[in-house]
Image (tube, rainbow, N blue to C red):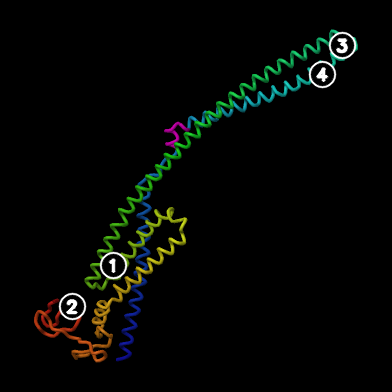
Amino acid sequence: MKGDAEYEEMEQLETSRAERILAVGMVVFMLIGGAWVLNRISSLVPYPDRTALEVGHGLVSLRDSVQVSQARFSEAQRIYAERAERATTAQAVYEFRREEYRVSMEQGAAADSTRAAYEASRTEYEAAVRERDIAARVKDAAAEDLSRVEGECREKEGLVAAAFERALRLRETKLFLLRAAYVIPALLLCFALWHRMRRAGSRYLIVGTALLAFSIIQVTIVAAQYSWHFLRGLGQLALSVVGTAACAFGLVAIRRLILSSARLARSRFRRGQCPNCGFPRASGAYCMSCGTKLTEQCPNCAAQRPVNAPYCPSCGSSG
């Protein structure tokens, strides 16, 4: 008899372990499905089109104008560099011819050819300076135009960035509302089902517990997604607070729901034990181990019924 009782107890223990393993697997597979649902919700709200915003704000045409202005400025720079180099060369020739003409005059041997070379070099130098100055003005105008267009482009880029940021925030708000509309009702429904099963003493309460765990994890994941950017600077502190609160809630829940005296008494009654100490029940009215009363009067038929029995064995009432 003792061996049979030990075998039955071991069988119940193994069954309980198998149920817990299956419940964990159930939660995992439901989370996979929940992740699929959350991803599908993400596809319902399109990602903002930055290109469309750029076209709408005229940024594309401005960028084309910037490229044209940059090409114009580069060409003006090239022309200015060429004319500046030409003016430098003409200046060197002019100064040489001028010095040559001055020396020949001091020696009294000035010739018409020397004078003509000097006059020609001066004319060429003055023309090169005029062309250089014109190229400088053209370059400055091109630089001013490029600066203006680039400023307008930067301003438009700022407007597009702000509009894109607003569109992103609007999308995230819509996604949050849609996800909340999914996870919060699911949590409430699973909690209501679990609470009803617990109150009814259902033998399948572990299924309701798995559903409740799944819905809680879903809500936690969604909440973490939308609160992380606020808490990332306080990551360790936030993890400490949330972890401590979760553990405290778990301890309270275990004490109140799983290890409560009423639940423990009902569990002992189902196993044929004393509700106070767990000693096996006997046919007497009191426990042989602790002296607790094991029977009470039925309020419907006045017969004696076991304490914590959901129904009277004499009249079948649940009072």
Q: Which residue is mark 1?
A: 208
Measuring from the top left, give residue 247's x and y in whole percent: 38, 69
Q: Residues within 10 Å of mark 3 (few under 14, many from 20)?
A: some
Q: Nearer the viewer, mark 3 or mark 1?
A: 3
Q: Relative to 1, is 242 above or below?
A: above
- Which amino acid type is shown beneath numbered disc 1? Gly
Question: Of callouts 3 and 1, which one flags the residue occurring earlier in the amino acid sequence?
Answer: 3
Q: Nearer the viewer, mark 2 or mark 1?
A: 2
Residue shown at the point (78%, 21%) measured from the top left: 92
Residue shown at the point (50%, 32%) measured from the top left: 153
Q: Which residues are magenta?
A: 51-59
Query: Spatial distance from mark 3 to mark 1, Cα to Cα?
Result: 118 Å
Q: Residue furthest left?
A: 301
Q: Which residue is mark 2?
A: 310
Residue shown at the point (41%, 63%) measured from the top left: 241
Q: Nearer the viewer, mark 2 or mark 4?
A: 4
Residue shown at the point (58%, 25%) measured from the top left: 142
Secondary structure category for the residue under label 1 = helix
Q: Is residue 53 magenta?
A: yes
Query: Spatial distance from mark 4 to mark 3, Cα to Cα?
Result: 14 Å
Measuring from the top left, give residue 298's x and y in whole percent: 12, 81
Secondary structure category for the residue under label 3 = helix
- Which amino acid type is shown beneath numbered disc 4? Phe
Q: Which residue is mark 3?
A: 105
Measuring from the top left, give residue 289's x and y in whole percent: 26, 91
Question: Of callouts 2 and 1, which one flags the residue occurring earlier in the amino acid sequence?
Answer: 1
Query: Which label number is shown at residue 96?
Result: 4
Q: Nearer the viewer, mark 4 or mark 3?
A: 3
Question: Of callouts 4 and 3, which one flags the residue occurring earlier in the amino acid sequence?
Answer: 4
Query: Spatial distance from mark 1 to mark 4, Cα to Cα?
Result: 105 Å
Secondary structure category for the residue under label 4 = helix
- Quadrant for the C terminus, please: bottom left
